[in-house]
Image (spheres, rainbow, N blue to C red):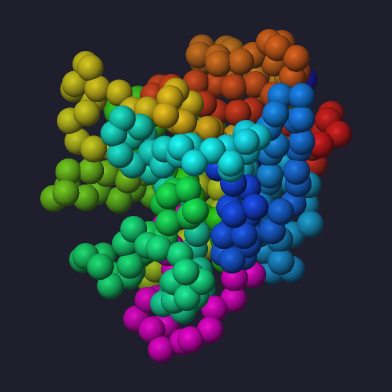
Amino acid sequence: MATDPKKYALNHTMLRVKDPQRSIKYYELLGMKQINKIENPDAKFDLYFLAYDSPNSRAAGEHWTGRQGVLELTHNYGTEKDDSFKIANGNSEPSKGFGHICVSVDHIQAACQRIEDAGYKFQKKLTDGRMRSIAFALDPDGYWVEIIAFNPVEKTENIKETDPGSYRFNHSMIRVKDNETSLKFYQDVMGMTLFRTSEQSSAGFNLYFLGYPGDNPVPKESSNGVNPTAEREGILELTWNYGTEKDADFKYHNGNDEPQGFGHICISVDDLDAACKRFDEKGVNWKKRLTDGRMKNIAFVLDPDNYWIEVIQNEKMKRTSNW
């Protein structure tokens, strides 16, 4: 029984939603499709799994556990009827921690116009502020969805069409207190590779992009001068604001304490038992071991900021569960 972190995948990001039909409609506008649903009527919640699944998508038709770039929406029954229920999007106190998910698109001006034409709001439009190559759309619960391009922005401004089937669920961003501690954890313990670093020293923060390259190594530069990781899926972005590591009382909100919103990221692995044994040997803090509770096919590791990381079996590599 062995495990190879090079075979791991950043499978999904989980967000709680108030009204699943409203949320699914939004993410379908962005080109995603529902690829699985797990109903839990006894516990009064359902899980919806969405991903890019058109013929030119990276993992079209594959089992959901074998993919990168899956979005899990969790719906607790009844929230859609509760006028006072509101999701915490992670970008304001007291729930600051999770930041956004990011979709990369072909023609960013046309893609943003299409979202606006459908009646959805933006946290930041392309033309706002000094960064004219990114936008932030707002989903129905107020989660931020960053929009980036895999074609140069200046070459697509006169293009009016966009193909949502070509989009990618590129990354998920979480804020971390101590960059060195988190980078060591995600590389040494979770087995990720640091793809690139963006140092914004004048603004007082750094961005780190990590993931599992698999058989697809990351080029240092893209052929067309844009972000070389824009066409990938399954990337984790860590945002570090300078100085937080020196404040003993500082901590981020993990999304699972009240007020709730973001739930977890999820790693799918080649051999679940062996991977959990390896994590044990690395001295991780467990939220849930495989042997805890009634669900014996999932585990949860805590990262240095107490974000939850679900660990599941990649069913493409070893069939263990019928989901």
- In the figure, is residue 119 to the left or right of 129? right
Whether residue 192 appears in this view of the structure is: no
Instruction: Report if residue 110 lies within the magenta region.
Output: no
308 relative to 265, above or below:
above
92 horizontally vs 268: left or right: left
Tell how many labels: 0
Q: Is residue 204 left or right of residue 2?
A: left
Residue 17 placement (x, y as % from top left) = 55, 42
Residue 148 appears at what percent x and percent y? 42, 64
In depth, the one of 142 and 246 nearer the eye is 142
The residue positioned farthest toward the bottom in the image shown: 158
- Front-most of residues 49 and 224: 49
Q: Is residue 131 visible?
A: yes
Viewport quadrant of the N terminus = top right
The structure residue drawn at horizontal position 30% and vertical position 51%, both measured from the top left corner, is 198
Q: Would you identify the image quadrant in which residue 28 lies? A: bottom right
Residue span colored magenta: 145-166
As drawn, 77 above or below 222: above
The quadrant of the rendering that contains the C terminus is: top right
**Residue in view at x 65 percent, y 52 percent:** 21
Q: Nearer the viewer, residue 25 or 124?
A: 25
Image coordinates of residue 86 in percent, x first then y, are 45, 39
Q: Residue at x 21, y 65 (%)?
A: 129
Q: x%, y% of residue 183?
A: 39, 32
**Quadrant in the rendering for residue 12:** top right
Q: Is residue 248 above or below residue 89?
A: above
Left-right relation of 239 to 236:
left
Q: Is residue 221 above or below residue 283?
A: below
Residue at image location 54% in from the left, 38% down from the top: 82
